[in-house]
Image (spheres, rainbow, N blue to C red):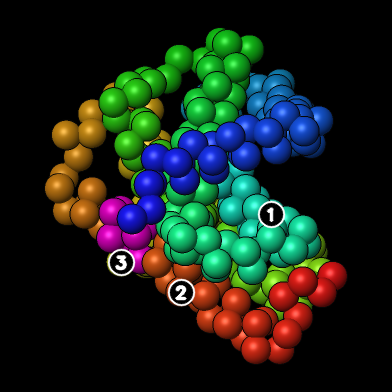
Amino acid sequence: MAKHHLLVAAVVEKQLVLLKRYWFNTLSMLLGMYAMFALVFFGGQSLGGADVESALDIVVIGFFLFLAASAAYFDVANSVMREAQWGTLEQLYLSPYGIDRVLCVKAVFNVVLSSVLAIAFLGLMLLTTSRTLSVDLLTIVPLLVVTILPAIGIGYVVAGLSLLYKRIENVQQLLQFGFAGLIAAPGAVQGPVLALLPVSPGSDLITIAMTEGTRLWEFPPAEIVVLVVNSVAYLAVGYVVFSRFVDRTRDRGVMGHY
């Protein structure tokens, strides 16, 4: 019987080595994100006005969620693509754990890493902007973890597309900016439509929690159920689609062709 703690240790060690090896890429992404945030925030602040001032908190929360979703999305998509380019993706199918368990552990690591980066980024934004938001970690962390699950599902779809069609960087970049629209959707869309969108239900709850100080247990149970079902469904569908793309790629014999 496979020892799963060895799998977890190996995956964590490998991911940390990759982070260390490609630290400049990670740092560049964070600095670029912060520069974009500073431009939007301080540019909006210079305009003044009560309406603009009240919207600045939403800008902070929006960038916080955008970083978390983007990090989770890119980590999953790029991780699978790198395995294929290195010729090690096929080896995952031959491991005693199977590719399902390996990718599951990687997904958990990506969720943890994305959450840590986003919360650290949030602290930096609050420090440099002197904004005051309710940051109850017992509320924010669970909501954030569930909210970014659809981003991982979408990352799996993109990874599957890249295995089959290879160079799809433009599509990958365009989908990233789609997260901005999904995060902002609660301000324009409500009701059943909002419940069907990925990321948006969680964005709505996190915004309420951080601006109004609502605790996790104070939300209506129905809203929490909608968020969990929505997120798990997108994650599951994303992985199923990825599996289908992998099967087609293997049938065509182009798994390692780049």
Residue 174 marker: none
Magenta-highlighted residues:
227-233
Badge 3 amino acid: Pro
Considering the numbered disc 2 on the image, is that residue within a helix, a strand or a loop? helix
- The disc at residue 192 is 3
The CA span between labels 2 and 3 is: 24 Å
Q: Does the image show residue 13?
A: yes
Quarter assignment of residue 193: bottom left
Gap between marks 3 and 1, in whole Å? 33 Å
Question: In the shown orientation, is residue 203 left or right of residue 41?
Answer: left
* Image coordinates for residue 101, horizontal then vertical, percent: 43, 57
Residue 172 visible in the current orientation: no
Quarter placement of the N terminus: bottom left
Which residue is located at x 59 percent, y 53 percent? 76
Q: Earlier in the sequence, mark 1 or mark 2?
A: 1
In magenta stretch: residue 170: no
The residue that disc 1 covers is: 78
Q: Is residue 249 left or right of residue 105?
A: right
Please name the amino acid that badge 2 sits on.
Val
Q: Which residue is mark 2?
A: 240
Q: Residue at x 16, y 34 (%)?
A: 217
Which x, y percent locates residue 84? 72, 64
> Badge 3: how crowded within 10 Å, few (<14), some, or many (20+)?
few
Q: What residue appears at the point 73 percent right and 56 percent down from the top-left corner?
A: 82
Q: Main secondary structure of the magenta part?
A: helix
Tags 2 and 3 touching, CB below 8 Å: no
Task: Return the x and y of residue 19 as percentages of the image width and height.
Answer: 69, 34
Earlier residue among tags 3 and 1 = 1
When the figure is inspected, residue 188 is found, relative to residue 7, above or below; the finding is below
Which element type, helix, strand or loop, lies under badge 1?
helix
Residue 126, picture quadrant: top right
Judged from the image, the secondary structure of the residue bearing numbered disc 3 is helix
